Structure formats: C-alpha cells, structure tokens
Image (cartoon, rainbow, N blue to C red):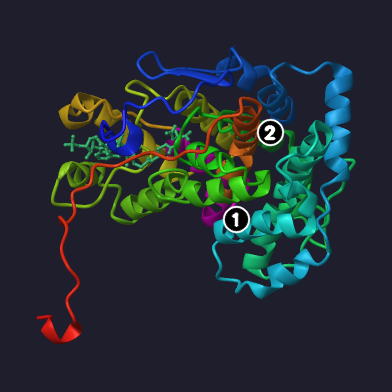
Amino acid sequence: QSGYVTLDSGYKNTGATKSAITFLDGEEGILRYRGYPIEQLAEHSNFMEVAYLLIYGKLPTQQEITDFNSQISRHTLVHEDMRKIFDGFPSSAHPMGILSSLVSALTAFYPESLDPNQSEEEMNLNIKRLIAKISTIAAWSYKNSVGHPVNYPKNKLDYVSNFLHMMFAFPTEDYDINPVVVNALNKLLILHADHEQNCSTSTVRMVGSANASLYSSVSAGICALWGPLHGGANQEVIEMLEEIKADGGNTDKWLAKAKDKNDPFRLMGFGHRVYKNFDPRAKIIKKAADDVLSALGIDDPILEIAKKLEEAALTDPYFVERKLYPNVDFYSGIIYRAIGIPTDMFTVMFAMGRLPGWIAQWKELRENKEPIGRPRQIYVGETERNYTPISERA
Ligand code: SDX
C-alpha cells in the first residue's frame, strides 16, 4: 500500500525477483547452476560450456558448443579505435576502471546494442561479442598497466588459452600454454560464473530494468564488483596475507585485530551474507590451490598463512558465533598468483568469470518483462520549513 514500507537495509530479507538460473542454500552450502551442482561442473565441464548452460538453460550438444565457440572466437578482436581509449589511460589506472569504461564504450562501436527492441538474433550477437571481447579488453588492460605491447587473439586457441596467450605472450617469445594452468583457470571461472542476486548481479538487473543495454548494465555490474567488500576482496585477501607474512606470520595478532570492534580491519575472504556454512566454492578452490602449486612446483608461504588463519578462525568463538567461514575470495588469489596474474587483475578475473551470470540474469529479466526497479524508503529528514533569505541565515 502507499505510505507503508518495510525497511530492509542491504535487502537481507528481500527477494528481488524470481529466477531459474542459480540455486544456493546458505545453510547447507549448496550451489547449483541450472540444477547442476557446481562440484560436478568444476570437475567435468569447462568455462564456455558453463557459460552456454547459464545463458541458454541447458548443456549444449557438440554442434551447439562448436558453433558457440567458433562464433565467440570470431569476435575476440576489438575495434582498432579502442586502442586510442586504452592509450588515454595512465599506466597507473586500475584495470577494473579500464574494464568498466571499455565495456560501456562498446555501445559506441555497436549502437544497435542500445535498441531495447532488438531481435533475439541481435541479442545473441551482442552476448557473444561481449564474452569474446571482455577477455581481450582484460588482457590489454594488463599489458597497458605494465607498459608491454598488447597481443592479438589467436583464434585457433580455446577461450582460456587465448586469454593466457594475450596476457603473457611477448612479440619476442610465445607463451607456453600449460594444461595445468588452463584447467585451473577454467575451474576458477566456472566457480565465479553466477551467484544469484549478489551485489553486482543486482546492479546489472537494476540498470537493465530501465531498458538499458546489456553493455551498460554489465559496465555498472563491473563497478559494483570492484568494491572491496564484494569482488575486490580477492585482491584484499592477498594484500592482507602479504602484510601478515611481512609481520612475521603472526596470525593470532591479526585475528585479534579482526575481532576488535575499534579496529576497522576485517579478515578479508571471510564471511558471507548467505553462506552460514562453508562456501562450497572455497572448498574446491582450496584443493585446486594445493594441486596447482604442487603441479607447478611452487611453494608459496602465504598459502600456509591462509591455512593457519582458516584453522584458527574455525575454532575461534567470535567467528564461530557469527558463522564466518572462508568465502570464494579467500584462496582464489593464491592460484591467480601462481599463474602469474598480478594482484590488481584479480577482480578482473572475477568479472570475466561472472560475466555469463550477469548476461543470463539480464536476459532473464528482459524475457520475464520485469518492471523497472524502484524501491521506497523511510524518510527521517526535516519536517516542512520555509525558505529564508541569505541575510537571515546563521
Ligand atoms: C563476495 O553475495 C554474494 O554472493 C557475493 C559473492 C558472489 O559470488 O557474488 O559471494 C562474492 O562478495 C564474497 C564476499 C567477499 N567479501 C569479503 O571477504 C570481505 C570481508 N567480509 C565481510 O565484509 C562480510 O562478511 C560480507 C560483506 C561478506 C557480508 O557482510 P554482511 O552479511 O552484511 O555481514 P555483517 O557485515 O553484518 O557482519 C556480521 C557480523 C558483524 O559483527 P557484529 O556487528 O554482529 O558484531 O560479522 C562480522 C561483522 O563485524 N564480520 C566480520 C567479517 N565479516 C563479518 N568480522 C571480521 N572479519 C570479517 N570478514
């Protein structure tokens, strides 16, 4: 009714929509994409197949995934004029700022994507363009930040291998694609692919509900994901672990800081709005971190610090009472680091992984003809008062 609203800050108890894409149960630690448990998808599938599943609602046949992959490969090049936008950024620019700007800039190169009445075929083309180009834009933003020449995509490579090539090859030498790395990155991207109505996905839906284009909606989602409490946490975790290592690995001291209400420090990578049990993704990523580091022969001391923190927190009453467990961001950075991805690219990796979920949710919103998002508020400001001339103001 008008005038009657229930305040629900942070929408902790509000269902914003109906969705058939992702199911998660925070108490049981269950996560499924279109009904498939993520444990099975992480084990048997690959990122492009999971992207297809999320967006189109079913696992593709061989012909469907072959067509999907070849159409995406065809769109990995970005318009050469985009180089001018890249070159306009200082090398100190954070890659997430570049990514959100360039994804929004796609509307300038593909103005037909702005048409809210675009055909199904046109929408699917815009979707494939975005999946293809985000990996090129991501790799180029990294090369831009380190002052290295960019690499053009090699379309005979699969999606993840192509990204690794663009990230790490040099005109002077090729990058040897290591299957262990490709497998680990596929797993990580699958595990980030969707997570129902999290902050960035809700942002994509809110912007899309105004009939804004896919590219504008995803650009807004990238900005929300950038927040340190959300996707930005994976970068914060590594910086936190590095700080603890530099401080002599004194995990007890840092756990005490995390519990101290007068100390703004939080144990990054811990806690979750929905999971009040172990984040099922964190379990898989923790094992993958062990596997990748041993396969690559890397002994990273911050992995031991992470495990020490986890063990201590799982028995500490402060964390146990508040049901704070490691979340998806706690171990992911250790794998990215082992692959050679720099810390300020970690949240870009999260965005690349989450893109199919954002697309699927934006598509579902439109197919369900959902109304424009427009919540109400509880007004706590001044009651009516009259304007006073400046000469009479204190
Ligand atoms: C992601 O929503 C999603 O699904 C997100 C995500 C996805 O896939 O899209 O899963 C990805 O964003 C994972 C979360 C990454 N963020 C972090 O790791 C940052 C650290 N975590 C927190 O800031 C926090 O746990 C949140 C933001 C994740 C959840 O915040 P909530 O649900 O609003 O919980 P809260 O801040 O109200 O905390 C409840 C209590 C508070 O203590 P009290 O006031 O009750 O005494 O727990 C405490 C908090 O102080 N607390 C922490 C803590 N997280 C919560 N104390 C220390 N360290 C922490 N990490």
In this orientation, does residue 299 appear?
A: no
| Ligand 1 in which quarter | top left
Q: Residue furthest left?
A: 394
Q: Residue furthest front?
A: 386
What amino acid is labelled 2 in the image? Val
Question: Mark 1 near ligand 1 (CB under 8 Å)?
Answer: no
Q: Work out which quarter of the rendered image holds the C terminus and state it.
A: bottom left
In this orientation, does residue 147 appear?
A: yes
Q: Secondary structure at mark 2?
A: helix
Q: State the image coordinates of residue 307 (x, y, percent, origin top left).
A: 37, 33
Q: Residue furthest bottom?
A: 391
Q: Residue at x 54, y 37 (%)?
A: 205
Q: Residue at x 29, y 52 (%)?
A: 248
Viewer-side residue, 332 vs 199? 199
Viewer-side residue, 23 vs 264? 23
Q: Quadrant of residue 128?
A: top right
Task: Kindly report the secondary structure that dominates the magenta region of the rendered protein.
Answer: helix
- Residue 180 is marked as 2
What amino acid is labelled 1 in the image? Ser
* Relative horizontal placement of residue 190, taking residue 378 as reference (left or right): right
Q: State the image coordinates of residue 379 (x, y, percent, origin top left).
A: 22, 47
Q: State the image coordinates of residue 358 (x, y, percent, origin top left).
A: 60, 36
Q: CA distance from mark 1 to mark 2?
A: 30 Å
Viewer-side residue, 151 vs 274? 274
Residue receiving disc 1:
100
* Range of residues picked out in magenta: 328-347
Q: Quadrant of residue 293?
A: top right
- Does 33 appear above or below 139? above
Viewer-side residue, 151 vs 218? 218
Mark 2 surroundings within 10 Å by alpha-carbon count, few (fewer than 14), some (14 through 19), many (20 or more)? some
